[in-house]
Image: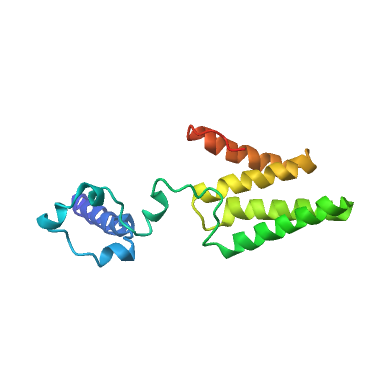
Amino acid sequence: MYKYILRIMALTAILLILPSCTKEVPKELLNQKPQTQQQNQQPNNQQNQMPDDSIHRNLKQGQDQSTDTQGDTKAEEMMKAADDAETKYQKSKSDGDKKTYIDKQLSAANYLMFEANLSPKKKYKPALQRYNKVLEIDPKNAEAMENKKQIEDIYQSMGMPIPN
């Protein structure tokens, strides 16, 4: 009797766990037909190309897009607002403009780092640059120091030099 109950419990557990182990396939890949042997015999330059789907788009090599925020309009808007605040502060040097400048730079950097729908290549370098600008004006800004350190740790963990 116990063996029967254990088998039913094991089968139930497997049936509950199995559906959660599936991986979602991008829509672009679902509609592709399987390659025939003739299609596999493409010239070398075509065989080495990555597919143009959501998984591979950000992995293409040879394209330096480290400060390119194209594709995320909010990131572009926030960076423009931060740049405008910087220009205004550079002209006036007033305390009010300084506070606005710091706030806009932090907002843009935090958005890039935590919320932007961009690849890491496109968001960490500009975020780091903005944290550095804040620290030039306010060297004791804890938020900028903490987030700058986090980005630097990311670069170090990947064995990459920290950008200026």
Which residue lies at the image location 70% right of the left edge and 39% below the top edge? 145
Which residue lies at the image location 69% right of the left edge and 41% below the top edge? 132
Position of 41 compared to 54: left or right?
left
Question: Which residue appears farthest toward the right when viewing the image?
Answer: 94
Percent from the top left, x then y, of residue 141? 76, 42
Q: How many circles with numbers are drawn on the protein? A: 0
Q: Is residue 162 above or below residue 120?
A: above
How is the rendered protein coloured?
A: rainbow
Which residue lies at the image location 48% right of the left edge and 35% below the top edge? 158
Q: Is residue 31 above or below residue 84?
A: below
> Which of these two is toward me, 132 or 39?
39
Percent from the top left, x then y, of residue 51? 30, 56
Position of 80 compared to 34: left or right?
right
Question: Which residue appears farthest toward the left when viewing the image?
Answer: 37
> Which of these two is toward me, 162 or 11?
162
Percent from the top left, x then y, of residue 15? 26, 59
When asked about the image quadrant of residue 107, the answer is bottom right
Percent from the top left, x then y, of residue 10? 25, 52
> Which of these two is toward me, 147 or 45?
45
Position of 12 compared to 120: left or right?
left
Q: Is residue 44 above or below residue 160?
A: below
When asked about the image quadrant of residue 26, the answer is bottom left
Position of 23 compared to 68: left or right?
left
Quadrant where the C terminus is found in the figure:
top right
Which residue lies at the image location 71% right of the left edge and 52% below the top edge? 105
